[in-house]
Amino acid sequence: MDAKADAAVLSAAARPRLSARWATLLVLAVVIATIPWFFPSGFYFRVAALVWVTALAAVGLQILMGQAGQVSLGHAGFVGIGAYAMALGPKYLGLDVLLCLPLGAALAGVIAFLVGRPILKLKGHYLAVATLGFGMLVTMVLVSEVGITGGPDGIRVPRAEILGWRIRGSETFYWIAGGALLIGTWIALNLQDSPSGRALAALHDSEVAARTIGIDVAAYKLRAFVIAAVYGAVAGGLLALMNGFVTPDAAGFIASVEYVTMVVIGGLASVPGAVVGAALLVLLPQALTVFHDYEHAVLGLLIMLFMIFLRVGIVPGLAALLRRRA
């Protein structure tokens, strides 16, 4: 009877998490499906597609930072690896550009595995500096190898074709990016509620305590790092495919800082928070163009206000506020 009672309690505790997971996916799917009705031109499809692609990279970083508690200032390096794979694979290896998307993700995963083993032994600001060095190294290679990567001027990405149909147009890429984000969010939410996700949450709270209860801390940190790298590479590949061109800026330090800001502003412990943070940082510069020379100052001020009044992030902060009022 005790075993049955324990099972019933665990089942009842899992139901709210399950319903919250599907509610998040449903809301995201409804948003992706309905907002095109309000777009007056193709430009809005392009901006929205950029939001979804950027959010996919931010969700991957949320797994590393929010779930595993590891800081990374080189996430854009993996985005750049995925983006350049879409250009270099067809040009030098004769591969189909669509095949280069999973190959770029696999390459980023392998590099993350090799790089992550030594640097994830570091903690705190030492880890942040190490990941920053990795991102800078990727950028330096992309800039200096002019004969291969095109250097600072970048390189063209060929258009993808499926059975003779060329994939192009902002509306087409909107649905591709939206579908990729929906799949990526579903995977991240399932990971969060899985035994592996609970192990990541344990080492996020205390690595010593997690190690005491038998969790292989090094292995789980490395898994989170590799998963985040794959997310970033897929996002970079989609971005390169959408733009038809890629430059080293995709892997730059500023891009890495922006990804970290998205995750922190949206809510470090929240998967939908990463999506909201990405949408905010992509859309705000578009909305603030009316301020011209003061655009960056106003953007910085808004970010400061968000962090002062919603310290845990936009999504967790608003959710807590609604619970208190209810």
Image (cartoon, rainbow, N blue to C red):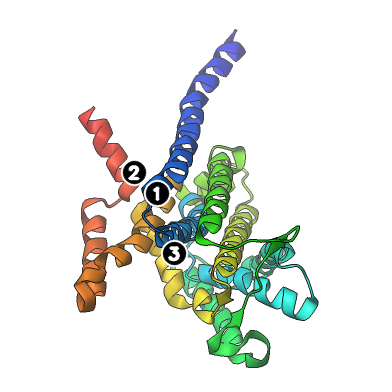
> Residue 8: percent from the left, percent from the top?
55, 15
- Answer with left or right where residue 187 lies relative to residue 313: right
Q: Is residue 300 visible?
A: no
Of the image marks 3 and 1, the number of the one nearer the N terminus: 3
Q: Residue beneath label 2, please?
A: 316
Q: Amino acid at mark 1?
A: Gly
Q: Is residue 63 visible?
A: yes
Label 3 crowd (10 A; few <14 / some 14-19 / many >=20): many
State how far apart marks 2 and 1 are (Cα): 8 Å
Q: Amino acid at mark 2?
A: Pro
Which element type, helix, strand or loop, lies under badge 3? helix
CB under 8 Å between discs 2 and 1:
yes
Q: Quadrant of the N terminus?
A: top right
> Residue 229: percent from the left, percent from the top?
60, 62
Residue at 73% in and 74% down? 89
Q: Amino acid at mark 3?
A: Tyr
Residue at 53% in and 88% down? 152
Q: Nearer the viewer, residue 295 or 46?
A: 46
State how far apart marks 3 and 2 are (Cα): 18 Å
Q: Nearer the viewer, residue 312 or 286?
A: 286
> Residue 268: percent from the left, percent from the top?
40, 52
Q: Which mark is residue 59?
A: none
State how far apart marks 3 and 1 are (Cα): 12 Å
Q: Which is in the foreground here, disc 2 or disc 1? A: 1
Q: Residue beneath label 3, please?
A: 259
Which element type, helix, strand or loop, lies under badge 2? helix
Q: Residue beneath label 1, please?
A: 273
> Residue 259: percent from the left, percent from the top?
44, 64
Q: Quadrant of the C terminus?
A: top left
